[in-house]
């Protein structure tokens, strides 16, 4: 197979370990697909993995590719792949272990890949997988939000928060949320009300929500509990050991780790295709200029207001 380009690294570390280099894409194994990447999206998980925070899962084999979320065209399929075929336009996520979506080609498990809605651009499609799946599993699979319920999303304009707010609204719930004080109007425009800043006074919102979704992992447990109605739940997606332990105890607090469930990803993709879920693209850069943009995103959390998308070809 011909040599391709990707962003990869030869040891765990900060942004300086990223290299734009040649690599040989592997053949898809059983249950896997090889995808020619058209666009890929950056997520905080990418740099957490590259920093070595998940090395217990990702191991010590280098070089390692970077990036998970992608949209592209299926170039080859492995044995046993039945849902997808060569030439299909898809979106999906590479596994945590293999990664490698910031590349011209990536291998992913078929279960983590679904058809791309025709109404979405490559960039819009690439923005969906991690944030869409996590939001869907928090709001729909776990919480089953519905009409008459109220949800509070802490960090409601981040990738996961924005997706969760839109999905909860689409399922009939009302949504309140917190965001940076300069972005309050943007949150209101999404239909979020009330909107408060990150350091809000919980007493003003006490006892009003069925679900408190802390996408930033910064809400003190006492504050989150104060917001809840009786029998409400708190969902946290930024686990620490202490949070994992708390999540096993009786009470409203649970940690959620998003999983690549095909039906969930398909539902999220369809919601985006139908315009119910909109994930704005804040910046698009070509693959050969992406290391600087990824470094900027990681260090300065910019661009704000949407996803950083890396395009190929
Ligand atoms: N467990 C899982 O399966 C899972 C899945 C996906 C993501 N995550 C994790 O969840 C987090 C959010 O992911 P994401 O993709 O949504 O990231 P993101 O797009 O960077 O969004 C983070 C949001 O948090 C806001 N924020 C910053 N400081 C805050 C504070 N002190 N209080 C409340 N909000 C604050 C940010 O606001 P500004 O933009 O104004 O700074 C931004 O809106 C990341 O740590 C990610 O690794 C976990």
Image (tube, rainbow, N blue to C red):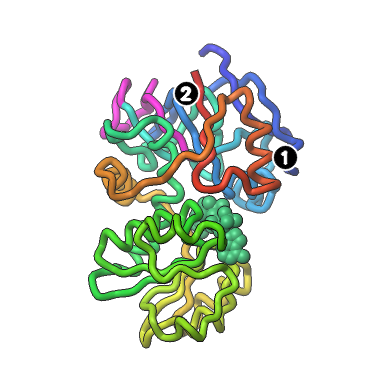
* Count of numbered circles on the image: 2
Q: Position of residue 299 (x, y in %)?
A: 70, 46
Nearer the observer: mark 1 or 2; the answer is: 1
* Residues shaded magenta: 69-88
Res 169 label: none
Judge whether residue 35 is colored magenta: no
Looking at this view, is 195 or 88 the one in front? 195
**What residue lies at 38% left-to-right and 56% top-to-bottom?**
189
Q: Which residue is mark 2?
A: 27
**x and y percent of residue 298 in the render?**
66, 45
Q: Position of residue 10 (x, y in %)?
A: 72, 33
Point out the residue furthest to the top here.
2
Of the four image quadrants, the one with ligand 1 is bottom right
Q: CA distance from mark 1 to mark 2?
A: 29 Å
- SS assignment at label 2: loop
Q: Is residue 10 visible?
A: yes
Asked whether 78 falls inside the magenta stretch, the response is yes
Q: Position of residue 182 (x, y in %)?
A: 56, 58
Q: Is residue 171 left or right of residue 24?
A: left
Give the mark nearest the N terminus, 1 or 2.
Answer: 1
Determine the residue positioned at 36% across, 84% down.
231
Say if residue 49 shows up in the picture: no
Instruction: Report the front residue among 57 and 294.
Output: 294
* Residue bearing the label numbered 1: 15
Q: Label 1: how many residues lie within 10 Å, few (<14), some (14-19) or many (20+)?
A: some
Measuring 52% from the left and 62% from the top, which residue is drawn there?
Answer: 179
């Amino acid at each position: 197979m011909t040599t391709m380009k990707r962003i990869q690294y030869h040891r765990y570390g900060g942004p300086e370990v990223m290299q734009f280099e040649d690599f040989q894409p592997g053949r898809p194994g059983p249950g896997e697909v090889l995808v020619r990447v058209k666009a890929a999206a950056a997520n905080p998980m990418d740099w957490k993995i590259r920093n070595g925070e998940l090395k217990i899962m990702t191991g010590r084999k280098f070089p390692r590719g970077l990036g998970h979320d992608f949209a592209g065209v299926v170039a080859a399929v492995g044995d046993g792949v039945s849902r997808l075929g060569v030439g299909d336009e898809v979106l999906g996520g590479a596994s945590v272990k293999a990664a490698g979506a910031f590349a011209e080609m990536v291998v992913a498990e078929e279960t983590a890949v679904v058809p791309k809605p025709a109404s979405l651009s490559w960039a819009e499609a690439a923005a969906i997988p991690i944030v869409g799946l996590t939001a869907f599993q928090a709001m729909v699979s776990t919480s089953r939000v519905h009409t008459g319920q109220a949800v509070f999303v802490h960090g409601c304009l981040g990738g996961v928060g924005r997706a969760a707010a839109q999905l909860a609204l689409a399922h009939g719930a009302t949504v309140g949320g917190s965001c940076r004080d300069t972005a309050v109007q943007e949150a209101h425009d999404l239909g979020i009300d009330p909107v408060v800043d990150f350091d809000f006074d919980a007493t003003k919102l006490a006892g009003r929500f069925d679900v408190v979704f802390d996408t930033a992992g910064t809400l003190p447990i006492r504050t989150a509990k104060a917001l809840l109605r009786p029998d409400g739940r708190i969902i946290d997606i930024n686990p620490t050991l202490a949070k994992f332990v708390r999540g096993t105890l009786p009470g409203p607090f649970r940690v959620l780790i998003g999983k690549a469930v095909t039906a969930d990803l398909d539902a999220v993709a369809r919601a985006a295709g139908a315009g119910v879920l909109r994930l704005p693209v804040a910046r698009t850069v070509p693959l050969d200029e992406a290391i600087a943009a990824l470094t900027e995103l990681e260090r300065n959390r910019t661009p704000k207001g949407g996803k950083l998308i890396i395009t190929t070809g």
